[in-house]
């Protein structure tokens, strides 16, 4: 125990804990005022500076593709003789589970239905609206978020494995701050800020996860213990992910990620085979084609003329696309940091192209099958999933499954998958904040991981009890803007290091 806590960087640890708890307590005590304040800041960022997030995502895609397709793509995350630690299946399973997390299940049916009933460009409730809804769902969960993760993971992995620097965000600023950057006050501020952003982001995901698990229990089994239900769910899941984090990646995260991949494929194939199979294949195929054909236009789209806002009746681009780019940015520290930890030995080209494309393909298949089934049901029998056109985000996936055979059994599998995603995202977060708060030590000790797990559980419980979830969501968005600048500087620093230190590149093809 003493050895575990002896590794803690006390200024970073204490600063992150104190600021996070202070923000949480103030937000809870003055929830109404805080919610208005944070929401006003987010509205300003989305309405006035939202275009910067659009340019930011475009910049990250261009940068990552340039590195992958250039001579620098041959560089390994480590020495030239290093090889991957994990098999491709386990590696991609862990990345996918950490990167998509709860949202993949939470929005699998809800987002396509939302776009279907309030279509940004088509007449709502029509077959055209169904294609548009899947197109934008693929867009929000496709190449863009995975590239944002890469933009953080790539510099962290390169500086750590290639140049033996601590696994910290501040290590990526070596090109600007010099070799002693780890002892500088600015570096500690960067790492402290990153931990705070990570904690807030994970607490937000806890809220989403416990709400949908609670909804599933109520919808499928008519089980509820009232207001205490989400608290019990949080405590139960917190115990599991803390145990997983404490036993390490090999025995914890690797095992549950592989198990979840199997559960996901079972659910997907069951829905595909028992649902309108041929229609799902056709709809998904066409939607993927439209997604790729409109990729550039959607990436640059800002609704400058306000046509989509006028069509939908609200700021659709801010409420969906910019909302997602902001949300993914808040997830980049812990997902990117975790991805870096498990990617030693892979070339930059392999890392970038694999993470950018393979999870995107899986996401399209997942949303195409589950979301497409709900869309087909609404096209065939309007109101069968969404009576009155009002989408219930928490229960929509269970409403869709109720139209299929063995609905109760498959709903249980979905709740299992949801719980596993809950665990993997939290596990990744605990792993990363433990490393960042212990001077970059990858084996930071079980006691520290348990401590962070308890803190995360307490934060989630406070938000659930006080109803402060919307406030902490707004708070996480506020933090995303400065971290967007941090990511840009990380990439610029990486490029400066590559051009300076990687002149004699080995063309290792093995």
Image: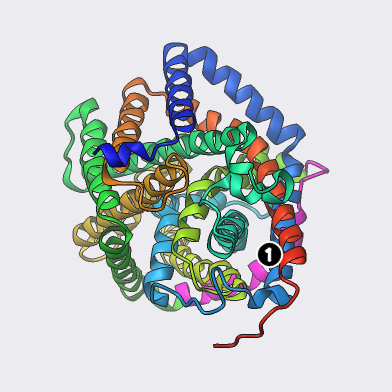
Instruction: Using the image, determine if residue 40 lies above or below residue 427.
Output: above
Which region of the structure is painted magenta? 280-306
Q: Which type of secondary structure does the marked residue at label 1 adopt?
A: helix
Question: Relative to residue 39, is residue 386 depicted above or below?
Answer: below
Colour scheme in the image?
A: rainbow
Q: Left or right: 225 with respect to 331?
A: left
Residue at image x 72%, y 66%?
Answer: 501
Residue at the extreme right of the image, as rendered: 305
For label 1, the residue is 64
Foreground of the two, 157 or 44:
157
Which quarter shows the N terminus?
A: top left
On-image quarter of the C terminus = bottom right
Magenta span includes 300: yes
In the rendered image, residue 338, in percent from the top left (x then y), is placed at: 45, 55
Residue sitting at x 33%, y 71%: 265
In the displayed structure image, the side of residue 344 where residue 356 appears, left or right: right
């Amino acid at each position: 125990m003493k050895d575990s806590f002896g590794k803690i960087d006390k200024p970073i640890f204490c600063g992150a804990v104190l600021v996070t708890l202070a923000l949480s307590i103030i937000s809870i005590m003055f929830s109404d005022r805080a919610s208005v304040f944070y929401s006003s800041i987010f509205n300003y960022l989305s309405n006035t500076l939202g275009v910067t997030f659009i340019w930011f995502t475009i910049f990250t895609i261009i940068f990552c593709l340039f590195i992958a397709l250039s001579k620098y793509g041959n560089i390994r995350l480590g020495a030239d003789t290093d090889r991957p630690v994990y098999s491709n299946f386990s590696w991609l399973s862990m990345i996918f589970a950490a990167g998509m997390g709860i949202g993949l299940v939470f929005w699998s049916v809800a987002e396509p239905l939302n776009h279907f009933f309030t279509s940004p460009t088509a007449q709502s409730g029509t077959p055209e609206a169904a294609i548009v809804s899947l197109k934008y769902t693929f867009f929000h969960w496709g190449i863009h978020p995975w590239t944002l993760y890469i933009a953080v993971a790539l510099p962290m992995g390169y500086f750590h494995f290639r140049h033996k620097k601590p696994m910290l965000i501040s290590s990526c600023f070596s090109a600007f701050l010099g070799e002693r950057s780890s002892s500088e006050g600015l570096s500690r501020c960067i790492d402290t800020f990153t931990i705070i952003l990570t904690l807030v982001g994970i607490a937000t995901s806890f809220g989403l996860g416990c709400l949908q698990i609670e909804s599933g229990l109520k919808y499928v089994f008519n089980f509820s213990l009232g207001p205490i239900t989400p608290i019990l769910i949080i405590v139960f899941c917190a115990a599991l992910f803390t145990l997983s984090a404490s036993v390490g990646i090999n025995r914890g995260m690797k095992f549950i990620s592989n198990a979840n991949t199997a559960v996901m494929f079972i659910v997907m194939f069951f829905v595909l085979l028992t649902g309108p199979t041929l229609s799902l294949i056709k709809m998904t195929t066409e939607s993927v084609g439209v997604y790729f054909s409109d990729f550039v236009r959607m990436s640059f789209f800002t609704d400058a003329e306000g046509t989509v806002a006028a069509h939908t009746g609200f700021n659709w681009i801010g409420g969906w696309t910019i909302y997602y780019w902001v949300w993914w940015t808040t997830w980049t520290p812990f997902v990117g940091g975790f991805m870096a930890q498990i990617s030693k030995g892979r070339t930059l080209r392999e890392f970038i192209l694999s993470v950018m494309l393979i999870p995107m393909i899986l996401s399209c298949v997942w949303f195409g099958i589950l979301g497409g089934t709900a869309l087909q049901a609404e096209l065939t029998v309007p109101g069968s999933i969404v009576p009155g056109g009002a989408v219930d985000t928490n229960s929509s996936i269970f409403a869709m499954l109720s139209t299929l055979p063995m609905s109760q059994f498959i709903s249980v599998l979905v709740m299992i998958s949801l719980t596993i995603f809950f665990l993997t995202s939290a596990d990744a977060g605990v792993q990363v904040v433990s490393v960042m708060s212990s001077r970059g030590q990858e084996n930071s000790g079980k006691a520290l991981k348990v401590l962070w797990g308890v803190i995360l559980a307490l934060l989630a419980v406070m938000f659930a009890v006080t109803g402060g979830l919307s406030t902490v969501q707004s708070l996480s968005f506020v933090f995303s803007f400065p971290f967007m600048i941090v990511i840009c500087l990380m990439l610029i620093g990486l490029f400066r290091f590559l051009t300076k230190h990687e002149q004699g590149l080995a063309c290792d093809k093995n």
